[in-house]
Image: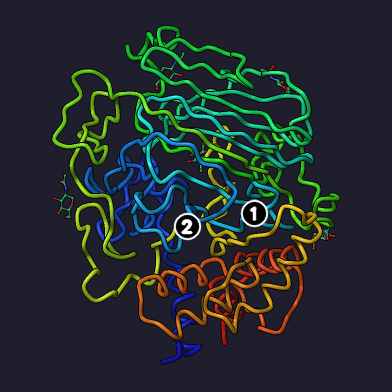
Amino acid sequence: MKFSSTVLLALASYAVADTVTCSSSQQCPEEKPCCSLYGECGTGSYCLGPCNPKFSYNLTSCAPAPICKSGEHQFTSTDKIISNTKYLGNADEYDFVVNNDIVTYDSSVLLTMANGSTGTVLTSTRAVWYGKVSATLKTSRTQGVVSSFILMSGVRDEIDYEFIGSFLETAQTNYYWQENLDYTQSRNISLSDTFENFHTYEIDWTEESITWSVDGQAGRVLKRDDTWNATTKRYDFPQTPSFLQVSIWPGGLASNAEGTRNWAGGYVNWDAEDLKDPGYFYVTLKDISINCYDAPANTPSDGSNSYVYTDVAGLSSNVKLSGDGTVLGSFSAVGFDMDKGSDNNIAEVSGSVPTGMGSGNNHSADDSSDIPTASVISISSVKKTTSSQSLADVTGTVSTTTKHTSSTKSVSIEDAKATSSAQATDAASSNTAEATAAATTSAVGGFEQSSSDSTTSAAAANGAVKVFASVFALGATALAAVLVI
Ligand SMILES: *[C@@H]1O[C@H](CO)[C@@H](O)[C@H](O)[C@H]1NC(C)=O
Ligand SMILES: *[C@@H]1O[C@H](CO)[C@@H](O)[C@H](O)[C@H]1NC(C)=O
Ligand SMILES: *[C@@H]1O[C@H](CO)[C@@H](O)[C@H](O)[C@H]1NC(C)=O
Ligand SMILES: *[C@@H]1O[C@H](CO)[C@@H](O)[C@H](O)[C@H]1NC(C)=O
Ligand SMILES: *[C@@H]1O[C@H](CO)[C@@H](O)[C@H](O)[C@H]1NC(C)=O
């Protein structure tokens, strides 16, 4: 069976017309109960990771969060990394989820941001509820381009390292309690060029304090006692199970709020040298280490498989240890109906894989319109290259492999360009939830691309941006038109 263009047309219109947002003033509806990191409602992927229980339909909408497991992850391969269009919550099988292109290079993975795209987020499949975590990485460079290594919880407690591409000798540290966006808490750590040099960025997070250390040397300590909020009589201190995220994202987008753009060092320079060679901005991630600490004393427990919120207040005292499973039956499943769709593989066609930028932290004072409602999402790319290859070789591999995506089912590189054709192929040839999710992603973020085309990833992403410009200008029909196959 082949998806007809009519189906895709319907799909596309549905996806665009039907984006449901969530915020403190608007919870998600029952049929799309999960509020994603980017403030959109859906099922499936939306219910995983840092799904927000406060803005979701109800307390059991988000899936239980897989419990912390200590480990060292050397990114010499992408074996333990899965695309968000395929991941359903099995944290035993995968350690990280990515929402975009990723390539291996010289015993590391590169998180990429092609011309005009919204970057890449890599998220741990398991949450940490106190622990010592670190990442060894080189940041991206160029003004307007932001690299981040953060801990992010469902209720938006956040502990951050952020790097602005035009200030390469500064690591910015910050924290937030439940999205209380108080930007005065940012502190800098000075260090040698973060693009040229690997540094190990560590966050040691206990109930009493947070210590940010670079290369083993403490650069900032925050004590919980110093976060007392006299007005609300509580500690504005990160205290809920949090996922690790490493990301690259365009803080300096023209469509972003001025505050965000200024913080990011100004407009993204889309003519920068990295976009010519290797063809994208990139973060080089070498390793991640997770050392789990025990949950707070007196935490209620009926198992040791997951963390579950017991109240939407979202405080440390509202979390329990649970035996509940974390795996969804399909992309239409949700926390209160975990097995939905598993018997027949019929998934919702829309709203099952979130869109969004590389970080939830948008640094705007009061303008929520600066987050694109649709963005360039492609299936995770997993491409092995030998360490002797140069970056240029990697780029070459990207485009070469991409040419083959429509003829081989097991694609090793699927960039923004390949996505639409690969997804169309999936949708046409299989009835799995995964294929439907892929079709959904295509409807949200893909665009028409002929299989023989050999343009670069960057140009492809740029094409996607043009598509979105059309969407905003002409509405759903414009997007639908480019999806006709
Ligand atoms: C949330 O809503 C679903 C669907 O209506 C329901 O089955 C579930 O029991 C609700 N959960 C809570 C905690 O009320
Ligand atoms: C941190 O460094 C950046 C870049 O040098 C600077 O713009 C910012 O004001 C600094 N922030 C603090 C809190 O010192
Ligand atoms: C205390 O909490 C209130 C409500 O969340 C918030 O508006 C205020 O900024 C907090 N005060 C401080 C000093 O952070
Ligand atoms: C990125 O895309 C923009 C808009 O199409 C274009 O002007 C620019 O030259 C591109 N940059 C590179 C390095 O190709
Ligand atoms: C961006 O900031 C606005 C205002 O602070 C907030 O309402 C919105 O949810 C934020 N978006 C994200 C993705 O954090």
Circle 1 or circle 2, nearest the eye: 1
> Spatial distance from mark 1 to mark 2, Cα to Cα?
14 Å
Q: Is residue 354 above or below residue 306?
A: below
Q: Is residue 475 above or below residue 377?
A: below
Element marked by disc 1: strand
**Residue 169 left/right relative to 445:** right
Residue 244 placement, left or right of 362: left
Q: Residue at x 23, y 46 (%)?
A: 58
Where's residue 54, x and y in %? 31, 39
Query: Which residue sits at x=73%, y=80%?
Result: 453
Residue position marked by numbered label 1 in the rendering: 104
First reached walking from the N terminus: tag 1 or tag 2: 2
Dividing the picture into quadrants, the one containing residue 78 is bottom right
The kind of residue tagged 2 is Ile
Q: Left of 457 or right of it: where is 390? A: right
**In the depicted structure, whether residue 160 falls above or below residue 62:** above
Residue at image coords 57%, 87% = 485
Identity of the residue drawn at 63% across and 60% down: 384
**Tag 2's secondary structure?**
strand
In front here: 118 or 327?
327
Disc 2: which residue: 82
Question: Where does the image place residue 391, in percent across and percent down from the top left?
Answer: 78, 54
Q: In this figure, which colouring scheme has been used for the structure?
A: rainbow
Does the residue tagged 1 have its C-beta within 8 Å of any atom of ligand 4?
Answer: no
Q: Are marks 1 and 2 in contact (CB under 8 Å)?
A: no
What amino acid is at disc 1? Thr
Q: Quadrant of the N terminus?
A: bottom left
